[in-house]
Image: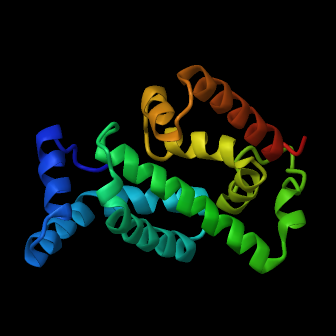
Amino acid sequence: MSERVPNEDEVQLVEALRGGERVTREAAFCRLFALYRRPVFALCHGLTGNRQDAEDATQEVFVGVLRGIRGFRGQARLKTWIYRIALRQALRMRDQRRRRDNATAALRQPPPLMRQAQPEFTAEELARALDCLSAAHRSVLVLAALEGMTSREIAEVLGIKEGTVWSRLHTARRQVEMLLRGE
């Protein structure tokens, strides 16, 4: 996870990003990038399942942050706002890859039946199972499992109720388990 930025620092960072002097804006962007690059990449990688797409999405996230910083109202934490941008961008990249590869039908197929004697699953089998999840279920699972976010944080990032997070997380885990068992 990224370093926690106190609200006062967030306010100063946002003001510097909006500021008039180029040097100030560049320094603020470098700080922002240093704080959030790794967690944004991890989120994007978890959602896209592809390193190159995650790198592209991460780059687009920070371009989007720079473009949209003037519209940031501060109603949510800066991290939450950045994660929302990352979530949308990663899912957009994932959808583009699916269209580009013309493999939508293949990605929706569950993984092949597993051998009963082998209880462990390969990363490839897990990735295929995750690809079978809807964007809503995959997002919740990735934020919880890979990012270690609480249900409250996930609800804030996704703009949904905490109960919905619990429901989607339960469903996502159950679906992945069933897919891995070949059901």
The percent coordinates of residue 19 (x first, y second) are 14, 64
Q: In the image, 38: left or right of 91?
A: left
Is residue 49 visible from the viewing direction of this image?
A: no
- Number of numbered callouts drawn: 0
* Image coloring type: rainbow
Outermost residue, top side: 163
Please tell me in which quadrant of the rendered image residue 66 appears.
bottom left
Residue occupying the point 21% across, 68% down: 29
Q: Is residue 171 left or right of residue 20?
A: right
Q: Is residue 66 above or below residue 148?
A: below
What residue lies at 76% left-to-right and 79% top-to-bottom? 100
Between 175 and 153, which is closer to the camera in this rendering? 153
Percent of width and height locating residue 139: 60, 46
> Residue 61: percent from the left, percent from the top?
43, 65
Residue 78 in percent (x, y) is at 30, 47
**Quadrant of residue 167 within the rendered picture:** top right
Name which residue lies at 51% across and 38% down.
144
133 to the left or right of 56: right
Q: Give the camera-side residue of 93 and 112.
A: 93
From the viewer's side, name the closer residue of 144 and 91.
91
Say whether residue 132 is visible. Answer: yes
Quadrant in which the C terminus is drawn:
top right
Write the residue at 19% across / 63% down: 17
Give above or below for 134 relative to 163: below
The quadrant holding residue 93 is bottom right
